[in-house]
Amino acid sequence: MSQKPIKKYLLAICSNTIKPISLIFLFGIISFNSFAQGFLKTEGKKIVNEKGENVLLRGFGLGGWMLQEGYMLKINKEAQQYRIRERIEELMGARQTQEFYDAWLNNHTRKIDIDSLKAWGFNSIRLPMHYNLYTLPVDKEPVAGKNTWLEKGFALTDSLLSWCKANNMYLILDLHAAPGGQGNDLNIADRDPSKPSLWDSEANQQKTIALWIKLAERYKNEPNIGAYDILNEPNWGFQNLQEDKNGTKEKLNAPLKKLMVDITAAIRRVDQKHIIIIEGNGWGNNYNGIFPVWDKNMVLSYHKYWNYNDQSSIAHIIKAREEQNVPVWLGETGENSNVWFTDAISLLEKNNIGWSWWPLKKIGFNNPMEIKSNLNYNSVVKYMNEGGNKPKESNVYSGLMELATYVKLENTIIHRDVIDVMIRQPFSNETKPFKSNIVKNNTIINAVDYDLGKNGYAYFDVDTADYHVSTGKRSAGNRGRIYRNDGVDILKDSLQYEKYYVSSTEKGEWLQYTVSVEKKGNYTLKLNTASNQSDGKISVSVDGQIVAKNISVPNNGNAKVFVPFEIKNVPLKAGKQVIRIITDAGGYNFNYIQFLK
């Protein structure tokens, strides 16, 4: 795709997602445009620029680029990156495997990705770095104790920094995979448990310190580098590795504090300007034994997943902020529904906590960009997860290279609903049409194209998000995990390519459609539904007035075979109005509405 169509494509996306909708949001946009005023620094409990203005970081982590966690590729067995690569080599050889990884690194994150994030309203990027793109593993060094530096990682970082500069954005460097690996959640740091970990090896720790010195020397004069996030998600039981392998119950954290103090001292020998971000044990949240902080330009990071979005859920980190008089930044969160996203961002910003979502893109629907899979790659995934017949080498190569092409922004599925809930909806209850719904004779609106907006405003669904860390019970949100990331359950119609329908309807749920009617009159609404029971009932409202009540949904004997039924004499005025399809009794599936005049 040429650059001109790409720019038009971005503008089309942006026009539907970031229109100013309130004074709060306007203030946010204005502050974004002026924020890149020299180096970021801490001022008490705030992050500020060199003008002393409060800076609220709103960003994305580039998970899956330098470090592929298996779940992002739908691989859940032996899912560390090094094992995935070894298994790919077994299927198609080292040369073709290298070709795939080169293409992946070149295509995953480009200037168009950073341009898009800026246009959508984000102001920062968190780069999860894999050390092996910057230096050799300890056991592969030609001379023990010396460091071989690799240009690849530094060149990728330089390019990313240049794109951030062009967009007046901050780049936060995050050591996501340290030499040896910093935890027992193996996929996160691409750790090989047969080799010494970061904590078992002084050589690995010295290489980690040396890498940060090298990075600080290279970027010490770069104000668009927002901070150094020196060690992502340590998760290690120092006192009792057998019973507390991820360090959530650790009381002392002495080795972690020592390493972070040593890294800080090494950085400060060459770079006194940049913020240093530290993370606690237990995936970033266990700060026992870490305090007091030891640097005057330091930020505390924590990570938040699958819990409630209330004040008590952040009480521990607010307490730490108050006691240590340092800023707090939510370095990683996401992997949930739109409802959870909006509630989390509202909570964070009320407490002046900046955030970085995770990740920007993967094979999955709850991020701004969804990487499309393909049949040959699906066969690779099935083989890696389940075993069975080995796929042909040519098919493996074809599937992986196609995947590396699909990772480009213009080939991904852009989820405008996810962008909207992060940038607009935390500050507005306004609803917007998901698509341009101009109603004339025979117009069809797909059921899944209900309005953009909060639960209770654009739609209402009973099961909206996953709070299993708080409740101990997983809930699905969108059970179909496809098309949109709200609570509404959506499935793909296996009989019609790229057709979707609303499923698992429950009493009290509803969907809203903002339409523009060309001609006033009485219309017949054809609702295309499928049901194998006789209990389903629907009501229809127009601009808040019920125009059809408790209409029975036909039982056609099959919940996947859709048959339209009619609701006659629905009065519609010319121009804009809001139609709601209300579930009085559920159990049916819903495909589309057709308007007949």
Image (tube, rainbow, N blue to C red):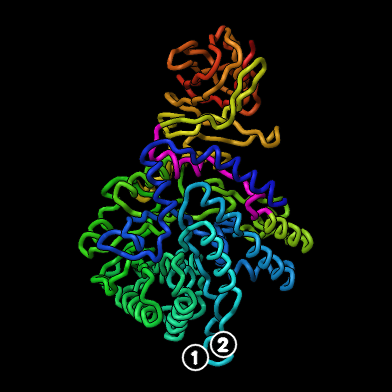
Q: Quadrant of residue 377?
A: bottom right
Relative height, residue 451 to residue 596 (above, below)? below
Circle 2: residue type: Glu
Determine whether the residue tagged by mark 1 lies in a helix, strand or loop: loop
Q: Nearer the viewer, residue 324 or 181?
A: 324
User: Within the magenta stretch, is there residue 76?
Assistant: no
Question: How far across and down, in percent of the image, does residue 214 sit?
Answer: 48, 80
**Left or right: 523 as drawn, with respect to 402:** left
Counting from the top left corner in percent of width and height, residue 193 is at 50, 75
Q: Residue furthest left?
A: 323
Residue at numbered disc 2: 141
Q: Is residue 484 visible?
A: yes
Q: CA distance from mark 1 to mark 2?
A: 8 Å
8 and 191: which one is in front?
8
Choose between 78 and 315: the one closer to the eye.
315
Q: Is residue 459 above or below residue 420?
A: above
Amino acid type at image mark 1: Gly
Per the image, label 2 sits on a secondary structure element best described as loop
> From the viewer's perspective, is 570 left or right of 275?
right
**Marks 1 and 2 in Cβ contact (< 8 Å):** yes
Above or below, 489 against 585 in this view is below
- Give coordinates of residue 287: x percent, y percent: 29, 66
Residue identified by numbered label 1 = 145
Q: Foreground: 9 or 259?
A: 9
- The magenta segment is 406-429
Residue at 72% from the left image edge and 60% from the top image edge: 401
Residue 252 image position (x, y, % from top left)? 26, 73
Main SS class of the magenta portion in the image: helix
